[in-house]
Image: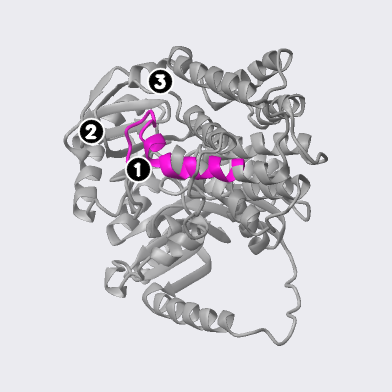
Amino acid sequence: MEINIIDARMFRRMFLSGAKNLELRKEWINQLNVFPVPDGDTGTNMTLTILSAADEILSLPEDAGIELLSKAISGGSLRGARGNSGVILSQLFRGFTKEIRDHETLDVPLLTAAFGRAVETAYKAVMKPKEGTILTVARAVSEKASEIAEETTDLSAFFEAVLAEGYATLEKTPEMLPVLKEAGVVDSGGEGLMTVLSGAVDAFNGKELDLSFAAPKTSAAAGAAAEHKPISTDEIRFGYCTEFIINLEKPFTEAEEKLMKSFLTSIGDSLVLVADDEIVKIHVHTNHPGLAFEKGLEYGSLSRMKVDNMRIEHQEKLFRESEMAAARAEEKTEEEAPAEKKKVGFISVTIGDGMSEIFRGLGVDVLIEGGQTMNPSTDDMLSAIKEANAETVFILPNNKNVILAANQAESLTEDCKVYVVPTKTVPQGITAMISYRPDADPAENFECMSEEIGRVRTIEVTYSVRDTKIDGKEIRKDDIMAIGDDGILAVGSDVAAVSMEALSQVVTDESELISVYNGADYSNEDTEALAGSIEEAFPDVDVEANYGGQPVYYCILSVE
């Protein structure tokens, strides 16, 4: 018997079934990540995106109509979108629901139009669409829907045809993207989309599924905070955060700058030094602030001198957080007046306590824990924008898989101007902050920051989670890999050796600075030894070593 109509109850069940199917298969989809890194997360990102919409649906009455369901799917997925794959999925849902929301039932012609609008919306959201991805699979499904709609109004035949076409296109993605073929996988985003569609069709065909879901997920920032164990003050190696400006009274040459950096790194870490013709800005963690000041006085007078005892501040921070948690648990009896907006605010995605401290020292107002191991959602970005409370807000995504979510947050923000600086790595984010000039207007700063990050080359050193072949390199499980901006640079069994091989491919005669940020699983001693090897191999380049504390990546190297 032909079925020609889908009502709201069936549509609700189909969507939840698609979400459940994705939740069940997310780890398999994660394994399709081209790079065999520990944080392959396409399945996780798409699942958290669709579950955000599922949570919205489950909060509605069971007899909710298609209009309410459409709003829940669109709003929930847009705000919950994580990573490029999650953002694209949310845009597909956004376009699809725009087409159906004013109808009480769905049929083949309406579904065909909805598929077409979904694809159109998703392609518009991506600046440089790439074929062989989730977009290609979605377009193939849409084109097949248009074709089959001319032949039948039977939904069973319609779904069978579009699913077959979608899976056939998915199998062709390795031929469209050589990197997929070399790695021996299909596109993970396309796999995720087909997992959702097949789950939805299972529900349409009457397959009994358990549509219960895990507890609602916390945001990336909240999740990280919940799992984070406060560090002991004993782990703070250099206790005083020291900042000052040298008002130059004599030339500060490149040689002098190198000597200053060498001295400051000998008495501390987390050094940031920015110099121009008139002033030198310095931020350093040290146990001897006086020595840093005395060194600065050799070049001129000092201003904006600031010393904070990080050990005391850390204990006070824990105390404040405890007080705030207690205060939030009590009911508010009075409405608080909103704080006056700042002129400019900065938001940065960060990984690791060391990286977070560096960004704080550079003036970042709101930090979002996330980055590689957990991409923050659009909602995380919107919450951070609100917390920044500024007329103009700069967002540093610091990960190529976070930029789309940041852009989506920018498009949803109406009460302030948001600039998303397209930083793809944490070192690019650090450079962007250093490049900011308070005396320039926001548009000029955005252009300057965007231009300066182009000078930064990044190398991330981690381990492989599976055997594969990519970029012409045979990789075995547990091998150490150095991943550059454009692919894998080196593979081996030793972090230092792999790092040095990667640097040899990135450092040029124009390179001036190499920064090393060691992760939580790479000791300070090993980092200092690596920095020494780098100085020996590249004597004409300044070398800085800083504690990053990032998970997964033994060290992150930047070359400028």
Q: Which mark is residue 180?
A: 3
Which of the 4 quarters of the picture holds residue 472? top left
- Going by the numbered disc 2, the residue's amino acid type is Val
Q: Determine whether, in the image, residue 294 is placed left or right of residue 133.
A: left
| Precedes in sequence: disc 2 or disc 1 | 2
Magenta stretch: includes residue 21 = yes
Image point (83%, 40%), residue name? 102
Per the rendering, the mark at residue 513 is none
Magenta portion: prevailing SS class:
helix
- SS for dot 1: strand
Q: Which residue is mark 2?
A: 498
Mark 2 and mark 3 in contact? Answer it, CB < 8 Å. no
Q: Outermost residue toward the bottom?
A: 333
Give the class, few, some or many, for how many residues have Cα within 10 Å of label 3's Cα (few <14, many ≥20): many
User: Magenta residues?
Assistant: 14-38
Among the two numbered marks 2 and 3 on one chain, the one whose residue lies closer to the N terminus: 3
User: Circle 1 is placed at which residue position?
Assistant: 556
Q: Residues within 10 Å of mark 2 (few under 14, many from 20)?
A: some
462 and 254: which one is in front? 462
